Image (spheres, rainbow, N blue to C red):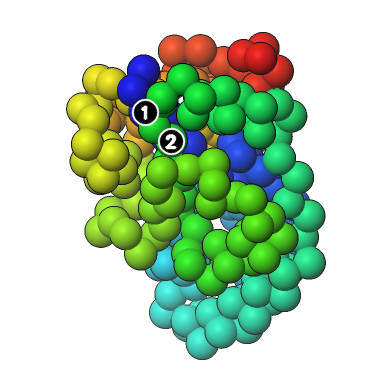
Amino acid sequence: MKAALFDLDGVVFDTEPQYSVFWGEQCRLYHPEHPGLENEIKGSTLEQIFERGWSGALEPEREKVVERLNAFEAQMSLDYVAGFETYVSNLRRKGVKTAVVTSSNLKKMENVYLKHPEFKGYFDAILTSEDFAESKPSPDCYLRAAKRLNVSPKECVVFEDSINGLRSGCAAGMRVVGLLTTNPIEKVRELSDIQIPDYLPFI
C-alpha cells in the first residue's frame, strides 16, 4: 500500500447515524411512498440526491432542504471513528500517502475545518464533489485521487462504508476495506476485501 484513500462520513467521522436521521426526515416528508429511500441515497452527492428525489414538481423545495441541511451540519457532532487518528498518523510515519475522497462539498468541509483544525494535517490531498465529474459508484473520484498522489490504482487501498462507495473502490481496481459503521457485514463483505468495525484492529 502506497496510498490510503478514505471516504469521509462513516469512515473518518462517525456521522452516518446522524445523516440517516436527517435524510430519513426529509424522505418521509417528501416521499412517504418510498420507505427506506434515505438508505439508497447514501454515498451520493447532494446534486445526485436532488436529481433522484427532488426533481419536477419538487425542484422548488431544494432551497428549503439545503437550508435545513446547512443548519443541521453546522450543529452536528464530528467524532472520529475509533482509532482513526492513531491509524492515519501511523500510516503517514511509514510514508504511506493519504487522501480524503468524499461526495461532500466545500461548504461541508468548511464546517469540518472549523471544528477540527488538525484535520488537513492528516492528509496529502482532500477531494470533494467539486473535484470530479462523476460521483460514486463511478470509479472516477478514486482514480483521480490516485493520479493526484502519483500512485497506481493497484497501490491504493480504499476505506469505505456505503454501498456506492464500496462499488466505486472496486470499480477503480483498488483493494477495499469495508467499515461496518453504516451497513451490515453481509452487504459489506460482498464488496470488500476486509471488513472492520473501526480502526482499533489495525493499531
Number of marks present in the image shown = 2
Classify residue 76 as left or right of residue 133. right
Look at the numbered discs 2 and 1 and tell me whether their residues touch, using CB distance below 8 Å. Answer: yes
Task: Identify the residue at image location x=70%, y=34%.
Answer: 81
Residue 199, above or below 129: above
Residue 33, above or below 13: below
Classify residue 139 as left or right of residue 56. left
In terms of secondary structure, where does tag 2 sit?
strand
In the drawing, what numbered circle is on residue 3? 1
Task: Identify the residue at image location x=72%, y=75%.
Answer: 71
- Residue 148: % across, % down: 26, 45
Give the quadrant of the C terminus.
top right
In the drawing, what numbered circle is on residue 98? 2
Precedes in sequence: disc 2 or disc 1:
1
Task: Identify the residue at image location x=48%, y=67%.
Answer: 106
- Residue 193: % across, % down: 44, 13
The residue closer to the viewer here, 94 or 21, is 94
Residue 190, above or below 3: above
Say which quarter of the image contains residue 87: top right
Classify residue 75 as left or right of residue 33. right
- Residue 41: % across, % down: 52, 51
- Name of the residue lying farthest toward the bottom: 60
| Amino acid type, residue under disc 1 in the picture | Ala
| Amino acid type, residue under disc 2 in the picture | Thr
In terms of secondary structure, where does tag 1 sit?
strand
**Label 1, residues with CA under 10 Å away: few <14, some 14-19, many ≥20:** many
Task: Identify the residue at image location x=49%, y=29%.
Answer: 92
- Residue 34: % across, % down: 60, 55
Say which quarter of the image contains residue 2: top left
The residue closer to the viewer here, 106 or 25, is 106
Give the quadrant of the N terminus.
top left
